[in-house]
């Protein structure tokens, strides 16, 4: 894509998003639709509307059966999310909705294509990946600007990888998602004026998981590159893994709500919402950078990249631990 075409998608998405936010926010406040204690939950609706318009205009020329299925199933996931925002669904109902949407995606041909593990295991990997990433983005949406900001970085990284590997359709879809989020991200920065809602976070996680599956990452001799999407999506994966472990150590069910999220721990440790967002997005940027590099380097270089990312995670965890110790000392 030329620079002018790139800018056209970004500017068009941003302007449509601004208009959408102003209109949807006004409707939400006036009629109480998608409204949580006076806060409009319209970020997801605006993102989906802009994404759909941009896809019809810019991605349609390269539409494949797989892309159609990805968009259809993502919109289905959005509908389930709207229902969840309107009246919170039970955990089994949420998983059932996610399984249905994932099955629709797979029916159109979007699934893991890992050589040597066979169709059954690839199907299992697809379900675990899509449902896992969908819920990871939902868990990430606990602090102003975090889920939307991470989605922009992750989508931009997938755009870069897809462009390098000449996956035109996946690259365009990733770029369209970035453009669809920009206006909402501005309104979602702390102090937030709109929220993404469960509809937004579920849609983002589901669509991003599908785009990641649609991209070809490397030839067979560079197996390390298969970990590229895992690293690019490292922040939501790391946050969810940390959250589940923290809840299990407290002998709580992993799916029960609690304040063990990484972002909430920063806030509890004395960080403002803006500083918390900055810290989390810096970590997200590092995950994305290492993930993009991992898709292009040799197996040996990739192993060193993974080692470097592990060191960064350890430093981050030590920072959290020192914050907790200072907090305990202050209240002790």
Image (tube, rainbow, N blue to C red):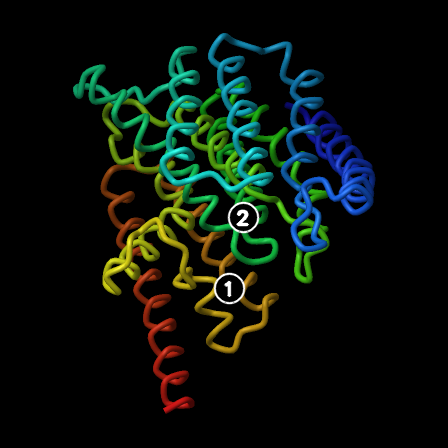
Task: Give the x, y percent position of residue 323.
Answer: 40, 78
Mark 2 crowd level (few <14, some 14–19, many ≥20, 10 Å Cα): many
Task: Please name the residue shown 47% across and 52% down the image.
Answer: 284
Task: Give the x, y percent position of residue 150.
Answer: 53, 47
Task: Please name the residue shown 44% across and 53% down the image.
Answer: 286
Task: Give the x, y percent position of residue 100.
Answer: 41, 21
Of pointers 2 and 1, the one earlier in the residue sequence: 2
Res. 146 mark? none
Horizontal side of 138 relative to 244 (left or right) equals right
Give the position of the N terminus as an image quadrant: top right
Task: Give the x, y percent position of residue 236.
Answer: 42, 48
Give the position of the C terminus as an image quadrant: bottom left
Horizontal side of 218 relative to 44 (left or right) equals left
- Report helix, strand or loop for mark 2: helix
Task: Please name the residue shown 36% across and 85% down the image.
Answer: 328
Horizontal side of 269 relative to 299 (left or right) equals right
Establish if 70 lies above or below 255.
above
Quadrant for residue 90, please give it. Answer: top left
User: Which residue has dot 1 on it?
Assistant: 279
Task: Please name the residue shown 40% across and 38% down the image.
Answer: 133
Horizontal side of 216 relative to 55 (left or right) equals left
The answer to whether the residue labelled 2 contacts the one labelled 1, judged by CB atoms less than 8 Å apart, is no
User: Which residue has dot 2 on it?
Assistant: 147
């Amino acid at each position: 894509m030329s620079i002018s075409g790139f800018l056209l998608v970004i500017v068009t998405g941003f302007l449509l998003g601004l208009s959408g936010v102003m209109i949807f926010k006004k409707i939400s406040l006036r009629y109480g639709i998608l409204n949580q204690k006076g806060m409009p939950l319209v970020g997801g609706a605006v993102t989906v509307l802009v994404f759909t318009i941009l896809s019809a205009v810019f991605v349609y020329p390269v539409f494949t059966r797989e892309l159609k299925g990805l968009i259809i199933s993502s919109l289905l996931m959005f509908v389930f999310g709207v229902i969840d925002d309107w009246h919170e669904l039970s955990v089994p109902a949420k998983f059932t909705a996610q399984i249905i949407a994932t099955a629709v995606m797979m029916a159109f041909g979007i699934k893991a294509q890992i050589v040597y593990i066979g169709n059954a295991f690839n199907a299992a990997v697809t379900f675990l990946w899509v449902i896992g990433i969908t819920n990871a983005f939902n868990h990430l949406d606990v602090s102003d600007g975090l889920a939307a900001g991470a989605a922009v970085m992750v989508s931009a990284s997938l755009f870069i990888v897809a462009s390098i590997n000449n996956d035109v359709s996946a690259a365009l879809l990733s770029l369209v998602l970035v453009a669809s989020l920009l206006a909402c991200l501005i309104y979602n920065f702390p102090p937030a004026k709109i929220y993404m809602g469960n509809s937004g976070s579920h849609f983002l996680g589901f669509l991003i998981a599908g785009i990641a599956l649609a991209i070809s990452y490397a030839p067979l001799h560079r197996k390390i590159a298969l970990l590229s999407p895992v690293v690019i999506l490292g922040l939501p994966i790391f946050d969810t893994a940390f959250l589940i472990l923290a809840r299990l150590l407290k002998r709580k069910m992993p799916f029960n709500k609690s304040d063990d999220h990484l972002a909430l721990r920063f806030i509890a440790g004395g960080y403002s919402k803006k500083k918390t967002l900055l810290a989390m997005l810096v970590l997200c940027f590092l995950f994305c950078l290492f993930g993009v590099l991992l898709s292009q380097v040799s197996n040996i270089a990739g192993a060193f990249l993974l080692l470097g990312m592990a060191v960064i995670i350890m430093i981050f965890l030590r920072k959290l631990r020192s914050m907790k110790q200072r907090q305990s000392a202050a209240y002790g």
